[in-house]
Each structure stands twice: as structure tokens, then as C-alpha cells.
Amino acid sequence: MKIFLDTANLEVIKKYNDMGLLDGITTNPSLLSKEGGDPQKTMEEISRIIKGDVSLEVVAENYEGMMEQGRRLRKYGDNVVVKVPMTAEGLKACKALTAEGIPVNVTLIFSPNQAILAAKAGAKYASPFIGRLDDVGKDGMNLIREIKQIYLNYDFKTQILVASIRHPMHVVDAAKIGADVVTLPPEVLEKMLKHQLTDIGLKNFLADWEKLKSEDPNISI
Ligand code: E4P
């Protein structure tokens, strides 16, 4: 399973990229707005830092605008994947951009039917938003199960990019289902790193080492 980070924060991206954890990045207009500054520079910089796929989203609502913006976004790097919304115009742009060799991530997917259409339009990634479904009392993870089954049935090449993840159990469940990618808010990735037994275990190891050293200060590793 690939791990993408769902952020436009350059410091955070560098931090986890240096740990070798990131296969890619997803951004959206809200994440860019949260960071402030010049969004073009930020998008360019993210595409430079990260070797894997970087999803950058169009803000046009019509086909022509999406095509123009998609081609421009792709100039930020060969690793740029153009994100288009799950609309009729978005699917048309998905098909045309894909035909031009520009990979597409269809975002804001909330049903198996939408995921089927994204695959038919040739999307490299389909992004179902599970947390937002949970928020309205639906089982977001069940959508991932359904899409996985459908894509397997027909050998669709579109990758399932699980989005709107809220906590580490979402990640475990997505991995069990066999989702291709999870895109994580940095807080979730941070929580995945931690375990209280790791902290306790490390504290005890170091205390025991200090005990040994107090008997012979010259010992070292
Ligand atoms: C994915 O590409 C989206 O940017 C993201 O996962 C949306 O998550 P949210 O529902 O927490 O805004």
C-alpha cells in the first residue's frame, strides 16, 4: 500500500519525506489556502521535493478551464497528477488529459457508481472520501470494500486512493481491504508512529544501560 501525505505544508512534507515514508502527496484548494502564501510556488516546491505522484487540483468547473489548468499544473513536474472533481465536466477532462499522457485523480467520490465512472474515464486514481461519509452517518470504509470488489471483477487499472482519513484504524482497515493508496493528514501519520509500549520499553532499556555505566563509566557500545 502506498502512503501519500494530505497536506500542502512544506516543512511537514520534508520531515516525513526525509524518513522515507512518502510515496506521494495530495493537495486541494482548502489545504493550499490553509498554508497561505503563493500557491503556485508551493505546488512547484512540493513537486520538486517529492519523487512520487503529487496531486494538484484544478479550480475550474468547465471542461475547457480544467484542460487549461491541468496542462499548466502538469508543467510543475513530470510527477504531477491532475485532480479533477467527480462531475460530468471533470470526467470529460479526465478522459482528454489521460489521452494527452497526463495522469488524473478523480476526487470527491462518494459512491461505487462514481468510482465505476472514474475508472471508465481512465483515471489513474479514484479518491473516495471516507471520513466525510462517516461524518454523515454512512460507513465510509464499506465504500472502499465495494469499489475494491468492483475493480477486481473487471480488472480496472484505476487505483483506489482512500481519502478523508481521520484516524489510524482507517489506515489498518484500508490496508486489510487492499486499497492501493491511503492519503494521510500529518496528525494521523504521527499517531501511526507511536505506541506507549515502545516509549516504556525504550525508557527501561536506557535506564538499564545507565545502571551498567554507573558500575563502570568506561563502557560504551
Ligand atoms: C484528498 O485528496 C483530500 O484532499 C482529502 O483527503 C480530504 O479530506 P478531508 O475530508 O479531511 O478534507
Image (spheres, rainbow, N blue to C red):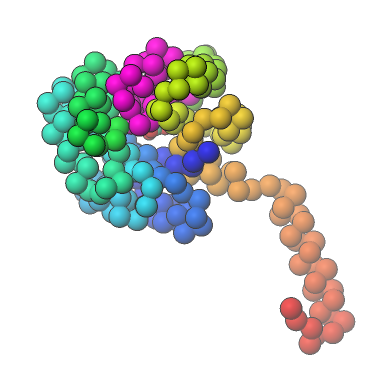
The number of numbered badges drawn on the structure is 0
Position of residue 170 relative to residue 191, above or below, is: above
Q: Is residue 160 left or right of residue 121?
A: right
Residue 193 picture location, percent across and down: 60, 48
Tell me, yes or no, whether the highlighted magenta stretch contains residue 114. yes
- Residue drawn at x 41%, y 28% is 157
Tell me, yes or no, whether the highlighted magenta stretch contains residue 57. no
- Residue drawn at x 87%, y 82% is 215
Magenta segment boundaries in residue numbering: 105-130
Residue 12 in sight from this viewpoint: yes
Out of 182 and 189, give the one closest to the viewer. 182
Position of residue 123 relative to residue 102, above or below, is: above
Out of 123 and 175, give the one closest to the viewer. 123
Out of 108 and 79, give the one closest to the viewer. 79
Residue 218 picture location, percent across and down: 79, 87
- Looking at the image, the residue that sits furthest to the bottom is 218
Out of 77 and 43, give the one closest to the viewer. 77
- Residue drawn at x 29%, y 43% is 80
- Residue drawn at x 34%, y 43% is 54
Location of residue 116 (image quadrant): top left
Residue 178 picture location, percent across and down: 56, 30
Q: Is residue 95 left or right of residue 174?
A: left
Position of residue 4 relative to residue 45, above or below, is: above
- Looking at the image, the residue that sits furthest to the right is 215
Ligand 1 visible in quadrant: top left
- Quadrant of the frame with the C terminus: bottom right
Residue 20 picture location, percent across and down: 50, 55
Residue 147 in sight from this viewpoint: no
